[in-house]
Amino acid sequence: MRTRWIAFAVVAFAGLTAFAPAPFMRADRDRKSGDVLASLQGTWTIVDKHRMGPNGKLLKTFNSQKIQIDKDVWRYVSALVGKGGLAKAKGKAATIGYKLELVQSSRPTEFRVRRTGALEGDYMVGILQVDGDSARIMYRLATTALRAEQATPRGFDPVPEGWYLMTLRRDH
């Protein structure tokens, strides 16, 4: 009789734990934790780029560059580099690197792309949002900021006059 109760207890315990929820994957929690710099690492193709004109209309700009982010270095590279094209053949694959600084506590994330060396100072300022393999970046050139002091927008709509809006896609 005692062995029946032990067998019943073991089966009951196994049955109860069989329906317990599975734990969340740790990688998902880490990715959602907000390390924007980590999520930006890699090479990105500029899919779309617009500039808000003085007439209140977004003007599409042509672009054949990619953005490469390695640690805290922002670099523009030619789209031909990945295809072994002209830029690589002439040895121009490596371009000037800018220091990328993020304010991850703000939503959306504020950023500065800064020149280093003799021309030290801001190059671009703006906001960015990363969603998996796509990103949106709204920025103004620092030279524009010198002419008209503007607060950094808290969202992507509307795009202020003189600001750029880019959509990026991660290269695989």
Image (spheres, grey):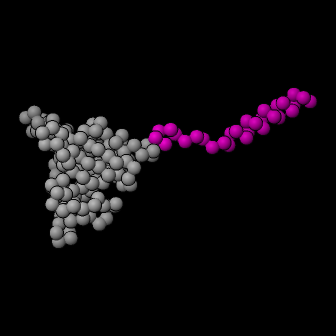
Question: Which corner quadrant of the image does residue 156 belong to?
Answer: bottom left
Is residue 116 visible in the rendered image? The answer is yes
Q: Residue at x 38, y 53 (%)?
A: 106
- For the C terminus, the image quarter is top left
| Residue at far right of view | 1
Camera-side residue: 96 or 12?
96
Q: Residue at x 68, y 39 (%)?
A: 18
Image location (x, y in percent) of residue 2? 90, 29
Is residue 68 visible in the rendered image? The answer is no
Q: Is 167 situated left or right of 11 in this image?
A: left
- For the N terminus, the image quarter is top right
Q: Residue at x 25, y 39 (%)?
A: 73
| On screen, residue 16 above or below 144 | above
Image location (x, y in percent) of residue 158? 29, 66
Q: Is 11 situated left or right of 99 in this image?
A: right
| On screen, residue 13 above or below 163 | above
Q: Residue at x 21, y 51 (%)?
A: 124
Q: Is 13 situated left or right of 111 in this image?
A: right
Question: Which corner quadrant of the image does residue 78 belong to?
Answer: top left
Q: Does residue 86 belong to the magenta stretch? A: no
Image location (x, y in percent) of residue 37? 34, 42
Question: Which corner quadrant of the image does residue 141 belong to?
Answer: bottom left
Camera-side residue: 121 or 53?
121
Give the magenta range.
1-30
Q: Does residue 28 belong to the magenta stretch? A: yes
| Residue at far top of view | 3
Camera-side residue: 14 or 53?
53
Image location (x, y in percent) of residue 10? 78, 32
Q: Main secondary structure of the magenta part?
A: helix
Camera-side residue: 129 or 27?
129
